[in-house]
Image: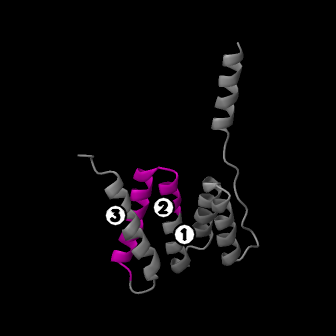
Amino acid sequence: MILLCLSAALLAVSCRSVPPVSTEGLSAAEIFQRAQDAAEKGDSAAAIRYYEVYKQVRPDDRERGAWASYEIAFLYFKMNKDDKALDLIDVLLAEYSVDNGELPSGPRILADKLKARIQAKNLPKS
């Protein structure tokens, strides 16, 4: 009976929805700072939400959007979700293939390095 109760409690905790983050009235720098603070506290899910919300509310800010995209991919990598991280890296790198010079080079360079690191990590052991 105790095991059943513990299992039910764990299931309830693991299924709870992730609360939304509020960015209303925040500057771009403040949103990024909140994302970084959440990441430093180990709350990768909240950090990802801040970056995703930023990209939704400020789609015209391609420079910070590129940084946000890289940070999201990196957070998934830190969460050991390599497939998701690689998918996001590929999307980011595709943006650079059609870039007309608006995007900063930093996210592309870091995304290339992270992609190589993930691919090397997932090579079959001989």
| Secondary-structure class at tag 3 | helix
Q: For the residues carrying marks 1 and 3, which lies nearer the camera in this image?
A: 3
Q: Which residue is nearer to you in this view: 103 or 43?
A: 43
Relative to 7, residue 40 above or below: below
Relative to 99, residue 22 above or below: above
Circle on res. 73: 2
Relative to 99, residue 47 above or below: above
| Amino acid under disc 3 | Ala
Range of residues picked out in magenta = 72-99
Looking at the image, tell me whether mark 1 or mark 3 is earlier in sequence order. Answer: 1
Rate crowding at label 2 as few (under 14), some (14 to 19) or many (20 or more) other CA atoms within 10 Å: many
Residue at image mark 1: 68
Circle on res. 116: 3
Looking at the image, tell me whether mark 2 or mark 3 is earlier in sequence order. Answer: 2
Q: Is residue 82 magenta?
A: yes
In 3D space, how far apart are the residues under numbered discs 2 and 3 (Cα atoms)? 13 Å
Q: Is residue 1 visible?
A: yes
Which image quadrant for residue 102? bottom left
Are the residues flagged by discs 2 and 3 in contact, CB closer than 8 Å? no
Q: Which residue is nearer to you in this view: 105 or 3?
A: 3
How many circles with numbers are drawn on the protein?
A: 3
Q: Residue furthest bottom?
A: 101
In 3D space, how far apart are the residues under numbered discs 1 and 3 (Cα atoms)? 20 Å
Measured as percent of width and height from the top left, residue 87 is found at: 40, 57
Residue lying at 65% horizontally and 24% vertically, measured from the top left: 7
Residue lying at 43% horizontally and 81% vertically, measured from the top left: 105
Are the residues flagged by discs 1 and 3 in contact, CB closer than 8 Å? no
Q: For the residues carrying marks 2 and 3, which lies nearer the camera in this image?
A: 3
Which image quadrant for residue 8? top right
Left or right: 44 as drawn, with respect to 20: left
| Secondary-structure class at tag 1 | helix
Looking at the image, tell me whether mark 1 or mark 2 is earlier in sequence order. Answer: 1
